Image: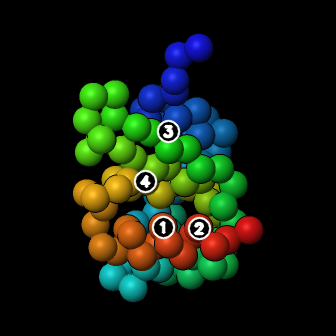
Amino acid sequence: MQMESLTGAINRLRDSGYAADFVALDDGALRCDSCGAPCDPDALGVEEVVRFEGSSDPGDAAILVAVRCCRGHAGLFSSAYGVDVALEDALALGRLATVR
């Protein structure tokens, strides 16, 4: 079975209605590009998480999170995963990890 690529997962989720993009802010909150609202990751609905490992370079690790913002927009947050993660992305991922 072939592993899903990051591009493939993005396309699959976009086709399922995850149209918005989310960007991590300095405090680890996520901003929804559909409505512009900053959302507390603790209040987001995490609907799917997909991790990717680089086939030859551990620095190629990435994560894709399908979320629903505090105003109901479905979208995606993506980040490097591991040592190359940006501080604001690491804060957001840490907060998302506690969401049930």
- The numbered mark at residue 78 is 4
Tell me: 57 left or right of 63.
Answer: left
Q: Earlier in the sequence, mark 2 or mark 3?
A: 3
Which tag is nearer the camera, tag 1 or tag 4?
1
- The numbered mark at residue 10 is 3
Which tag is nearer the camera, tag 1 or tag 3?
1
Instruction: Name the residue beneath numbered marker 1.
Output: 93
- The numbered mark at residue 7 is none
Q: Position of residue 81 (x, y in %)?
A: 38, 54
Which tag is nearer the camera, tag 2 or tag 3?
2
Tell me: 82 left or right of 3.
Answer: left
Is residue 31 shown to the viewer in this render?
no
Residue lying furthest top in this view?
1
Mark 1, Cα crowd under 10 Å, few <14 / some 14-19 / many 20+, is: many
Q: Is residue 58 above or below residue 70?
A: above
Helix, strand or loop under label 3: helix
Helix, strand or loop under label 1: helix
Q: CB of mark 1 within 8 Å of CB of mark 2?
A: yes
Distance CA(mark 4)–CA(mark 3): 9 Å
Distance CA(mark 2)–CA(mark 3): 20 Å
Q: Earlier in the sequence, mark 1 or mark 4?
A: 4
Which tag is nearer the camera, tag 4 or tag 3?
4
- The numbered mark at residue 97 is 2
Helix, strand or loop under label 2: loop
